[in-house]
Image (cartoon, rainbow, N blue to C red):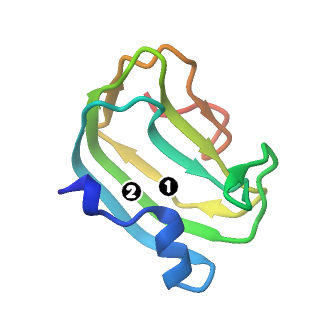
Amino acid sequence: MDVASSPTLAQLARLTEHQINNVTYQNIALTNISNYGVDIQQDYLNGGPTGKPTNGVKISNIKFIKVTGTIASSAQNWYILCGNGSCSGFTFSGNAITGGGKTSSCNYPTKTCPS
């Protein structure tokens, strides 16, 4: 898969009227990543993060399968920040993102990020 040409979740949301459903990220090799290995944020307003996620876009049935790679020591392996009740059905299988020196942060599916 050519990640550079893949749609972002934000782009998909614009196409599906505030809902993202049934997306699979599979067999992706991460290289030269400087911020986040995987990043899902529902706290953007006017082009920047606020730290307070909202429920404006429902995200459901997202699969991460064999997303692998080593990222920069200044990066986070995983960052998932969902609004209360707006994310559901995420599955993680065979992922191996390593190298991030910052602690991963996830509030969905639990307080613990995928390993």
Mark 1, secondary structure of its residue: loop
Residue type beneath disc 2 = Lys
Instruction: Identify the residue at horizontal 39%, vertical 67% (top origin).
Output: 23
Which residue is labeled 2 in the image? Answer: 63
Local packing at callout 2 (Cα closer than 10 Å; few below 14, some 14-19, many 20+) is some
Residue wearing tag 1:
90
- Residue 13 horizontal side relative to residue 48, left or right: left
Pointers 2 and 1 in contact (CB under 8 A)? yes
Residue in view at x 69 percent, y 51 percent: 48
**Relative to the observer, which residue lies in front, 64 or 98?**
98
Please tell me which of labels 2 and 1 falls first in the chain: 2
Image coordinates for residue 15, horizontal then vertical, percent:
49, 83
CA–CA distance in space, label 2 to label 1 = 6 Å
Single out the residue that lies furthest toward the right. 52
Quadrant in the picture for the C terminus? top left
Q: Quadrant of residue 113?
A: top right
Look at the picture and state if 20 lies above or below 42. below
SS of the residue under disc 2: strand
